[in-house]
Image: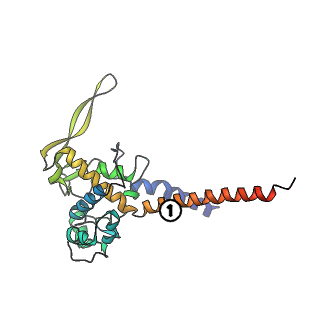
């Protein structure tokens, strides 16, 4: 009986306390909608270019191969000339040259693999794509952090803002907002130093990047859905033929 009671307590801790600790560093904020279009190959190509130039320096995508980008309309030559900068072959995995031990020493933690991050970040608050889209647009300057950066969606994040030159610098400032019959004080992001891109241009760049990362998390999704639709069509045809055969077989039986 004591063993069963101990097991029940252990299960309770594992299912409630441990997940709470794992997500304690994140805050529940309203996520902005990411306009994802897996059929927009131009957006996917732009996103792949941004990912290779800005994300792959620190993060790996070790379950994705460069030659898989042919699925989004790129030729092997285009991939080799525009997206492969480390001398690896087009058929190899998208890995970073950064040593995880060095990364942990510099940032306090090793940068995670990003292959399936768009799927792993899905929650009740929104999709993983929405999370990434909001996250990459809500970095702000914070002198109390080791990297000098913080994030609204992921407080006390160890990652610095890799796209800050494009977006510019933001700070978290207090602002007045109209509520139900009164004015309340809220914290909002305020741009202090403009970036090389206008806000609408930066939002589009992030949308393309998130579109690519969503594709990368499940490259075969379009093929899987297509095969599934054909399979359902075949099943319906077989059902119709089976019903017609059944009627023909039993038509003379009263």
Determine if residue 143 is in view: no
Measured from the top left, where is residue 19 in percent x and y? 44, 56
Quarter of image, res 173: top left
Quarter of image, res 93: bottom left
Measured from the top left, where is residue 240 in percent x and y? 66, 56
Measured from the top left, where is residue 68 in percent x and y? 34, 69
Please, is residue 7 above or below residue 185 in the view?
below
Measured from the top left, where is residue 150 in percent x and y? 23, 51
Determine if residue 251 is in view: yes
Number of numbered discs present?
Answer: 1
Q: Is residue 45 left or right of residue 168?
A: right
Dot 1: element: helix
The residue at the point 25 percent across, 38 percent down is 187
Q: Is residue 5 left or right of residue 48?
A: right
Please, is residue 4 above or below residue 26 in the view?
below
Q: Is residue 164 left or right of residue 66?
A: left
Residue that protrudes farthest toward the top in the picture: 181
Q: Is residue 86 left or right of residue 238?
A: left
The residue that label 1 is drawn on is 227
The residue at the point 20 percent across, 47 percent down is 201
Which residue is more in the foreground, 63 or 47? 47
Query: Which colouring convention does the figure follow?
Result: rainbow
| Neighbour tally class for label 1: few under 14, some 14-19, many 20 plus, Cα within 10 Å | few
- Which quarter of the figure is the N terminus placed in? bottom right
The residue at the point 24 percent across, 65 percent down is 52
């Amino acid at each position: 009986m004591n063993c069963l009671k101990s097991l029940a307590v252990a299960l309770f801790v594992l299912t409630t306390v441990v997940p709470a600790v794992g997500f304690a560093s994140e805050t529940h904020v309203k996520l902005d909608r990411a306009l994802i279009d897996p059929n927009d190959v131009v957006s996917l190509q732009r996103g792949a270019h941004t990912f290779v130039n800005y994300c792959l320096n620190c993060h790996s995508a070790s379950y994705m191969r460069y030659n898989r980008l042919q699925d989004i309309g790129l030729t092997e030559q285009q991939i080799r000339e525009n997206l492969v900068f480390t001398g690896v072959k087009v058929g190899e995995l998208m890995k970073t040259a950064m040593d995880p031990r060095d990364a942990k020493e510099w940032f306090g933690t090793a940068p995670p693999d990003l292959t399936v991050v768009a799927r792993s970040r899905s929650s009740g608050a929104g999709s993983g794509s929405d999370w990434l889209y909001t996250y990459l647009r809500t970095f702000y300057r914070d002198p109390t952090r080791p990297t000098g950066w913080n994030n609204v969606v992921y407080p006390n994040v160890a990652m610095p803002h890799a796209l800050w030159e494009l977006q510019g610098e933001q700070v978290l400032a207090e602002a007045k907002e109209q509520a139900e019959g009164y004015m309340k004080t809220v914290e909002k992001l305020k741009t202090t130093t403009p970036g090389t891109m206008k806000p609408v241009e930066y939002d589009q760049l992030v949308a393309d990047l998130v579109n690519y990362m969503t594709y990368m998390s499940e490259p075969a999704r379009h093929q899987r859905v297509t095969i599934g639709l054909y399979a359902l069509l075949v099943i319906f045809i077989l059902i119709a033929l089976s019903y017609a055969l059944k009627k023909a077989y039993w038509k003379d039986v009263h």
